[in-house]
Image (tube, rainbow, N blue to C red):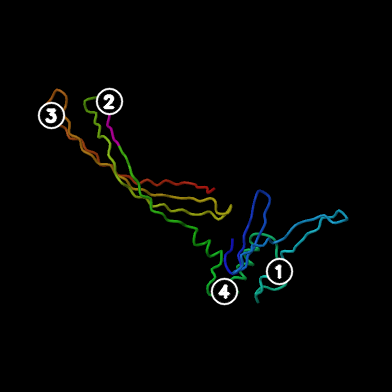
Amino acid sequence: MVEGGASLYLYEDKNVKRFFFKKQFSNEIKALVSKKYLTENNKIANNFQYKQQLLNSLTCSSITLKTIKNLLYTRNKLISLFDNYNTCSAPTTYVSSSKKQSKDVINITLRPRYNLSSFFIKNASFKTRNVDFGNKSSFGLGIEVEYILPFNKNKWSISIEPTYQEFSSTRNSLLKNTNFNVTNSINYKSIEIPLSLRHYL
C-alpha cells in the first residue's frame, strides 16, 4: 500500500486483515502485531505490539510518542503514518501514496477497431428494387476514457468510448425486363458512444 523508505503491506482474506512492514535495505517483512487474547481471568485483552514496533522502527522528528500512542490498526491511519515517515526521511524524492493514487483516477486509451459491415435494402412493393450492398471491411478508431471510482479498493470504474465508423458503397443494377440501369449508393457515418460499468477481479 505504501512503498518507500518504509513500505506497508496488507494481507486480507474475508474477515482477516493483517498489516506488514519492511524497512529499506532489509529483506525481512515483519508482521505488525495486533491481536486479542484471553487472560487467566477469562477476560479479553489486547496486544498492541505494533505500536512499539513502529515506535522503534520509524524514527523521525514528525512522529512523536503521542502519534504512535493514538495510532489505530486501520488501513488509512497506517498509510498516513508511513507517508509521514517517508516524507520526513526523504522529503525531496518521496511521492505520497495519495498523490500516486490521484494520478491513476482517469485512464485514456486508444482503441483501434476492425469492422465488417453489410447493408441490404428491401423494397416490400417492388422486389426487383431490392439492393444488396454486400460486405465491406474497414478500420475504425475509438478513444476510451475510464474513471476509477474511489471506493471498494478502486475495483469499479466507469468508461466511455466514442467510436467513429463509416460505410459507403455503390451498386449498379439492371431493372428486370427493362433496359434501365439503376445506380444505388449509400454513405453511412456514425459516432457510437457506449457507456459501461467495469469491475476488476
Q: Which residue is mark 4?
A: 90
Q: Position of residue 63 (x, y in %)?
A: 67, 73
* Residue type, label 4: Ala
> Is-magenta flag for residue 21?
no
Of the two numbered discs 2 and 1 in the rendering, the one whose residue sits closer to the viewer: 1
Viewer-proximal residue, 121 or 67?
67
**Distance CA(mark 2)–CA(mark 4):** 77 Å
Of the two numbered discs 1 and 4 in the rendering, the one whose residue sits closer to the viewer: 4
Are the residues at dot 1 and dot 4 in contact (C-beta closer than 8 Å)?
Answer: no
Seen from this angle, which residue lies furthest right?
A: 41
* Residue type, label 1: Ile
Q: Which residue is mark 3?
A: 180
Secondary structure found at label 1:
helix
**Distance CA(mark 1)–CA(mark 4):** 20 Å
Secondary structure found at label 3:
loop
Image point 25% across, 41% down: which residue? 168
Seen from this angle, which residue lies furthest top?
A: 177
